[in-house]
Image (cartoon, coloured by chain):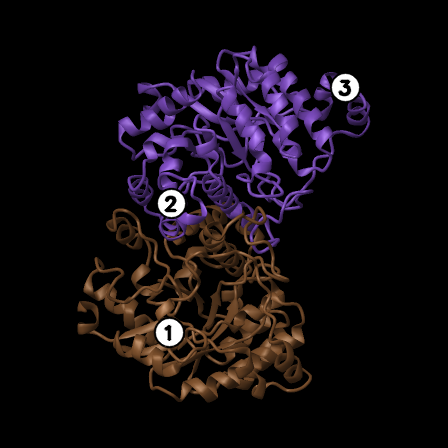
Chain colours: A brown, B purple
Amino acid sequence: MPLTESFKVIDADVHNEQDDAALVPYLPEPWRSRVAKSGIGMAGSGYYSPVGVMKKDAIPPGGGKAGSDPDLMVKQLVERYDLEYAILTGVIYNISATHDPDFAAAICSAYNDFLIAEWLGKHRAFKGAMAVSTLDPVLAAREIDRIGGHPDIVEVIISSAARSPLGHRYYHPIYEAAERNGLPVAIHPGAEGAGSSTAPTSVGYPARYIEWHTNLSQTFMAHLVSIVTEGVFVKYPGLRLVLVEGGIAWLPPLMWRLDKNYKALRSTVPWLTKMPSEYIRDHCFLTTQPIEEPDNPQHLIDLFNMFDAENIILYSSDYPHWDFDAPDMILRRLKPEARRKIFYENAKKLYNL
Amino acid sequence: MPLTESFKVIDADVHNEQDDAALVPYLPEPWRSRVAKSGIGMAGSGYYSPVGVMKKDAIPPGGGKAGSDPDLMVKQLVERYDLEYAILTGVIYNISATHDPDFAAAICSAYNDFLIAEWLGKHRAFKGAMAVSTLDPVLAAREIDRIGGHPDIVEVIISSAARSPLGHRYYHPIYEAAERNGLPVAIHPGAEGAGSSTAPTSVGYPARYIEWHTNLSQTFMAHLVSIVTEGVFVKYPGLRLVLVEGGIAWLPPLMWRLDKNYKALRSTVPWLTKMPSEYIRDHCFLTTQPIEEPDNPQHLIDLFNMFDAENIILYSSDYPHWDFDAPDMILRRLKPEARRKIFYENAKKLYNL
C-alpha cells in the first residue's frame, strides 16, 4: 500500500456502534428503565438502502452490530491500514432528530461515558468525538464542559439533521463551549427527514434513498452558508468546524456564489470583515468519504487545485459503512505532499494529536 | 462589444412585468372582480434585498414596473445588445406558491393571453414562455394544449418553489403536455419559502436574503435529482428541461455524486438505462445568469471543460433584475466556438427559432 508506506494515516470518521442495552448502565432514571424496556427509539427517515448501510464483513463473528467490537475494528481498520489514530464518531448524534431535549441530552451523556469507559482506553489509536444533541444547546454546552477536557476526547459531534440552519443564534452555546474547550465541532448526516428534523431537501421529501443520499450535500451547503453569514466564526474566532460525510467537490462553486452575493449584499451581514470563502478556508475542514468520483479522476484533482483543498480536507474511511473508502484507494493522483496533509497532518494539527 | 460583432445573441431569461390590473381584462369571473378589487396577492417569502430586485434604470420614465414597457425593453436590451431573440419569462410562475389551484390556473391563463396580445407581436425579437401553475398539473396540461401551439410561444415555465420534488409523478401531466407540444419546460426560482411552498433550504428558513439567494441552487439540485431518478426523461424522451437562474458550476459535482450513487443503488431506479449524468447532458440546459465568478476566472472555464458545458448552457441576462449580466460582460475567456453556442446556437436549436 504505497500511501501508508510513507506516512501514517489518521481516519476522521470511524463509526463505533453499540446495542441500546450497552448504554443502560450509564443512564440515570427515568431514562434507564425506559431504554432497558423499549430501547432508545431513534427516529427513522424511512429511506431504504438496498445495499444496506453496513459493510457485511464488519459484523462481529459472534454477533452484534457492525462496528461494535473494538478488537475487530483494530484488526480490520487500525492494523490493516496502519492508522495512527481513528476518530470514533459513533452514530448517537442522530438522537437530535427525536423530540424530547432532556431524553436526547441523557442519551448523549450516557454514550459519552460509555465511549470513554469502553472504547477510548482499549487502543492507543482510539480518539473520541463526544456527542451532543442540538435539541437543547444549553444542555449541550454543559455536557461539553463536563466531558470536553478528557484527554482522549478530541471533538464535539452534532447531527446535520436539524430544525433550522446551524448558524442560528439558538445553537451558539454549543460553539461557545466547544471553543472554550478547544474542541472542533463536527457535523454529521444520517437522520435527515426523520422525526423532528426538516424535510431532507429544500423541496420536501424525495422518493428514494439514492436521492436522499445524493442530496445530503445540500444540507451541508445550507448549514455552512448559515454559519458563515451569521458570523459564528467572528463571534468564536477559535472555533473550527468539520463537515463530515457531506462531500467536498461542491465547495468551490458554493464559495464562488456566496462571495459574489456578499459583494452586493454585505450590508446585511456587517459583522463579516472578510470574504465568506476566507472564513471557510480559515475555520472549516471537510472529510473525504464519500469522495466524488468523476469519470476522469483528474477532474477532482483539478477542482481541488481551485481552492485550498490540501489544507482543509481530512481523510475518512466511514468504516464500517457500505461505502467505506480505504486509504489506499482514493486520491492516488494527488501529489505526495498534498496526500501527506490530507491523510495525516491536517488531522494531527486540528485534533492536537 | 466584441461578442456581438461576430454573432447574434439570444437571451433566455428576460422578465417582462405588468401591474396586476393589466391582467383584469383577461380574467373570467369570479377572478376578475377579485383581482380588480384586491390585486393578485402573490405570496411573499419575506426575504429583503437591500439592493432591490430591479435595475433602477429599467423603470419606465412615465412610471410603472421595471420591465413593463416593451419599447424601453427594446431600447435597453434588444437594440443595445443586438439580441436576435429575447425569451420573455415574466414572473407570474410565482403564483404556484399561493394556495388555490383554480385561481392560480386562471391567473396563468390570463397572463398567457396578455403576453400574446400585448407583448409577442410588438417586436420580432420577442418570444414567450407560457406560464403554468404546479398546483394542479392537469389544469396546467390543459393550458399547455390551449396555448402551446402559438408560433411565438417557445417554452413552458414553472416555479421551482413547490410542495415536493418536481420529478414526482404528480407533476407528469405537465411534462407530457410539454413534450406533446414540442416545448421545453423551464424552471425558475423566486418564491422559495413563500406561501404553500416548502422552506427554502433543506434545513428550514435561513435568516437573510444573501442566504436565501445563495441557497437557491440547492433547490435546482434537488429537483434535478428527482426528475432524473424518477425517470421523467425515460417516460418523455422528447422532453427538454431548462434550469433558469439557478447557477451552473454546481452541476459537475452533483453529476459525479449522483452517478456514483447510481452505480451502487441502480436497483431502486431500474427504469434508467444510462448514467444519470447522461440524461442531464441529453435533456437539460442551464442559463448563465447569475454566473458564478471565481477570483480566478479561469477556474470557471476549467470547470466548464469538465462537462458538456458549451452544448447545454444558454446565455441569459435576467433583465431587468439587479444582477443583470450583459452579454459582453461574461464568459469572455471562452473560445469563440463555445461562445457562439452559448450565446446563440444552443438556444436557436432548443427553441426551434
The chain letter for the residue carrying disc 2 is B
Residue under the point 41% across and 85% down:
A120
Q: Position of residue B334 (x, y in %)?
A: 29, 33
Using the image as rendered, state which of residue A195 and residue B344 is in the foreground. A195
Three-letter code, disc 1: Leu
User: Element at badge 1?
Assistant: helix
Residue picked out by circle 3: B28
Using the image as rendered, state which of residue B253 and residue B331 is in the foreground. B253
Residue B60 visible here: no
Three-letter code, disc 3: Pro
Q: Is residue A284 left or right of residue B20?
A: left
Task: Calculate the distance from the C-alpha at mark 2 to the C-alpha at mark 1.
Answer: 31 Å
Q: Nearer the viewer, mark 2 or mark 1?
A: 2
Where, by quadrant of the figure, is residue B141 drawn?
Answer: top right
The chain letter for the residue carrying disc 1 is A
Residue picked out by circle 1: A350
Q: Are marks 2 and 1 in contact (CB under 8 Å)?
A: no
Q: Quadrant of the C terminus of chain B?
A: top left
Q: Crowding at label 3, few (<14), some or many (≥20) Cα neighbours within 10 Å? A: few
Residue picked out by circle 2: B255
Q: Are marks 2 and 3 on the same chain?
A: yes
User: Element at badge 2?
Assistant: helix
